Amino acid sequence: MAKLTTTKAVINALGGVKKVAQLTTADYNAAWNWTTWETFPADTYDVMIKALAAKGHSAPSTLWRQRQRPTKLQMEAQAG
């Protein structure tokens, strides 16, 4: 299983811009723009992460501006 870390790598793994545009119901030009962005629109997370998993890939949720669950160490630091 490949862990993909860029928007371009995710798009390539899903079959390219045209396939991603169809998958997300986005305009082709919008999906093409994502190849140069650091993150995807948050509302594409669910459909894209499921499509990646079906192909045996994964990517960090932060690529869709999703918050990560705090680690135990972070929670302890916040508690003071």
Image (cartoon, grey):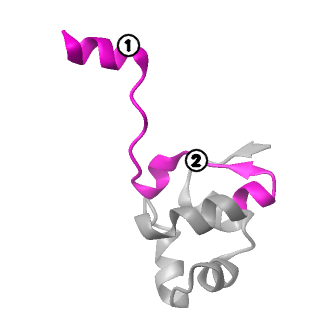
Three-letter code for the amino acid on which mark 1 is drawn: Leu
Residue at 42% x, 38% y is 68
Element on which disc 2 rests: loop
The one nearer the camera, 67 or 2, is 67
Residue 19 on image: x %, y %: 70, 81
Residue at left offset 66%, top offset 85%: 18
- Quadrant into which the N terminus falls: top right
- Residue 61 vs 77, above or below: the answer is below
Q: Secondary structure at mark 1?
A: helix
Q: Is residue 24 left or right of residue 19?
A: left
Magenta residue span: 52-80
The numbered dot on residue 47 is none
Q: Quadrant of residue 17?
A: bottom right
Quadrant housing residue 28: bottom right
**Residue nearer the viewer, 32 or 66:** 66
Q: Which residue is mark 2?
A: 5
The percent coordinates of residue 11 (x first, y second) are 64, 67
Instruction: Give the amino acid type for the residue marked by disc 2 in the picture.
Output: Thr
Closest to the observer, 37 or 65 = 65
Q: Nearer the viewer, mark 1 or mark 2?
A: 1
Residue drawn where x is 55% and y is 53% of the image: 6
* Residue furthest to the left: 80
User: What residue would you read off at disc 1?
Assistant: 73
Q: Residue at x 39, y 28 (%)?
A: 70
Image height of 6 relative to 37, above or below: above
Q: Do the CB atoms of the residues marked 1 and 2 lie less than 8 Å apart?
A: no
For residue 62, above or below residue 35: above
Dot placed on the residue nearer the N-terminal end, 1 or 2: 2
In depth, the one of 39 and 48 nearer the eye is 48
Q: Quadrant of the C terminus?
A: top left
